[in-house]
Amino acid sequence: MATYRVRSNNLRVEVARKGPDGKPIRESKTFDNTPQERLKAEKWAAQIELDIISGKYVDTRDADTTTLLEALDRYEQEVTPRKKGAVQERNRISLWKRSDLANKTLSSIRGVDMATWRDKRLADGTSPTTVRNDLTLISHLYSTAIKEWSFESLTNPVAKIRLPTAASARERRLDLDPDENGKTEEQRLLAECDNGPHWLGPMVRLALETAMRQGELLALEWQNIDLSRPVARLVNTKNDHSRTDRTKGRDVPLSPRAIAILEAFPRNISGKVFAIGTMAVVHAFQRACKRAGIEDLRFHDLRHEATTRLFEKGLAVEEVRAITGHKTLAMLMRYTHLRAEDLAKKLG
């Protein structure tokens, strides 16, 4: 039965009855104390009772009281650790926690709020791909809340807006043309990497020789390197589907130059080849590029460069895929940037 209480100019309606499972359900809502609003209150109470009796009632209290900030905390604890890109995702979560939407409840955030946030980020100069990835995180948070946290009443506000179009694939390669001192970009880059931390030069050279991702290089362990074969075993790569997958990982063949790099590199007691963190690599590489006078070059561009060089050496598509670990041919092609002038030479 519904009970009605008048407080000042408000009419508070409370519905309390047992659900089909025998558990008590309580729901309340406040209306203006006017005849017209009283009719709305009675219709609301009748609908709630009908939903409870028929088993269609959905509890909205958690969604109405849980803020985005609280949901992000839970998501970071329960979901993020299971992802390979956990470090990058925590950075995205930190960004969202500082946003104006963080203190709003999940149920109160609308599509227009997400659209406003999107447009502001784009206007501030953030790349469309970054904004798209940030929104994808929130979309997955809502999906998780609906499917796994019993927030069935929620609707996903990200699903109601247009996501920014992803940027075109990068085609940045190291410039072969020498500068006024006769040095190419690669020569200048390697020279400045050697002037940085002792590990930076070997890591960049190994990236160019093997096409390994930055994360794969950082996870590489000496126990998984066999210089006699010569092969480096990557046991946990980006494209592995499961942490328990027995077939995960891949073997990367080592060129004579890669072998020489590893043989000359001192071993760390940790067992890792490069016992450093992601951000240390990012900052050291950026500083080396700046000293070398190189613009718009990222560490990940080295993977593009190395992949293309494998094709230039005459390796077949499937041979290159086996080395780089790309899941699909389409993705492999995004990493391949053959120079037209080199192709022209092959035409005779």
Image (cartoon, rainbow, N blue to C red):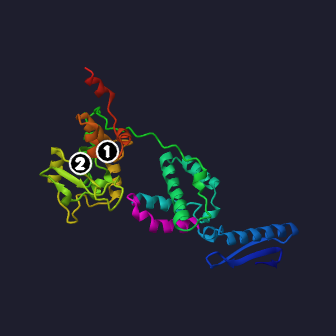
Residue 142, horizontal then vertical, whole percent = 55, 60
Find out whether residue 69 is within the magenta segment: yes
> Which class describes the residues within 10 Å of circle 1: few (<14), some (14-19), or many (20+)?
many
76 left or right of 50 in image: left
Q: Is residue 10 visible?
A: yes
Quarter the C terminus occupies: top left
Q: Nearer the viewer, residue 230 or 241?
A: 241
Q: Nearer the viewer, residue 50 or 153?
A: 50
**Residue 229 numbered mark, or none:** none
34 left or right of 280 in image: right
Residue 38, horizontal then vertical, whole percent = 83, 70
Residue appearing at x 38%, y 40% in the figure: 330
Q: Nearer the viewer, residue 58 or 98?
A: 58
Q: Is residue 191 visible?
A: no
Q: Secondary structure at mark 1?
A: helix
Residue appearing at x 37%, y 58% in the figure: 84
Q: Secondary structure at mark 2?
A: helix
Q: CA distance from mark 2 to mark 1?
A: 10 Å
Residue 198, horizontal then vertical, whole percent = 23, 55
- Which amino acid type corresponds to the residue marked 1 in the rendered image? Arg
- Which amino acid type corresponds to the residue marked 2 in the rendered image? Leu
Chain part drawn in magenta: 67-86
Quarter the N terminus occupies: bottom right
Residue appearing at x 36%, y 56% in the figure: 241
Residue designated by label 1: 303
Residue designated by label 2: 206
267 left or right of 101 in image: left
Find out whether residue 78 is within the magenta segment: yes
Q: Is residue 290 above or below residue 46?
A: above
